[in-house]
């Protein structure tokens, strides 16, 4: 296998700002620091796994129809001709209809250098039609990412560079 990327944590400052926005009950630096210190970088479960598991920073319970935006504390630096695609873990999707709100997360190589340090968020919804509540314990794998190589067209002449996070590449 070719090695094309590496994961790292965003800075504590970045994580603190993003985390307390989603989870205001973590109202002190000490509480957020404890979460930050436990973050696990994505990793594969087996040597033939394609997906890198992404882990919950804290325990979350989602009632049917509820959504949570998860600040993972993670960023990824990868070769320019690769993209990191994020999907729900198949078991959670199968058992609970746990879904990503944007269906598939697309992390471009230049997202690493964006204003938010390339902080990856995963927004998930318990979309059950069976009334099931899903509990995601702290440090449980809840989504997975796969690196995929891509190409561009012969006449591609894009020179615009990213300066921001979500939606920053949307045409105006």
Image: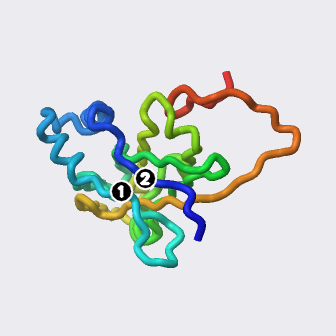
| Quarter of the rendering occupied by the N terminus | bottom right
Indicate left or right for 56 with 156 as reference. left
User: In x, y percent, where is residue 94?
Assistant: 46, 70
User: In x, y percent, where is residue 87?
Assistant: 51, 58
Confirm or deny contact between disc 1 and disc 2 (CB under 8 A): yes
For residue 76, which numbered disc appears in the image? none
Indicate left or right for 44 with 4 as reference. left
Please, what secondary structure does the residue beneath circle 1 have?
loop
> On screen, 127 above or below 12?
below
Label 1 sits on residue: 41
> On screen, 51 above or below 63?
below
Colouring chosen for the image of the structure: rainbow
Label 2 environment density (alpha carbons within 10 Å; few <14, some 14–19, many ≥20): some
Residue drawn where x is 43% and y is 32% of the image: 116
Label 2 sits on residue: 7
Which quadrant of the view contains residue 137?
bottom left
Q: Foreground residue, 2 or 162?
A: 2
């Amino acid at each position: 296998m070719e090695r094309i990327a590496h994961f790292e944590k965003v800075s504590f400052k970045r994580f603190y700002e993003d985390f307390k926005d989603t989870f205001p009950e973590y109202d002190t630096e000490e509480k957020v620091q404890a979460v930050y210190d436990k973050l696990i970088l994505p990793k594969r479960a087996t040597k033939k796994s394609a997906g890198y598991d992404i882990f919950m920073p804290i325990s979350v319970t989602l009632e049917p129809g509820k959504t949570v935006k998860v600040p993972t504390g993670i960023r990824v630096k990868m070769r320019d001709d690769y993209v990191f695609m994020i999907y729900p873990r198949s078991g959670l999707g199968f058992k609970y209809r746990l879904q990503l709100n944007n269906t598939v997360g697309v992390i471009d190589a230049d997202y690493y250098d964006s204003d938010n340090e390339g902080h990856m968020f995963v927004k998930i919804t318990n979309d059950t039609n069976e009334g099931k509540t899903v509990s995601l314990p702290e440090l449980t794998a809840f989504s997975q990412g796969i690196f995929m190589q891509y190409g561009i067209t012969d006449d591609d002449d894009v020179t615009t560079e990213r300066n921001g996070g979500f939606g920053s590449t949307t045409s105006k």
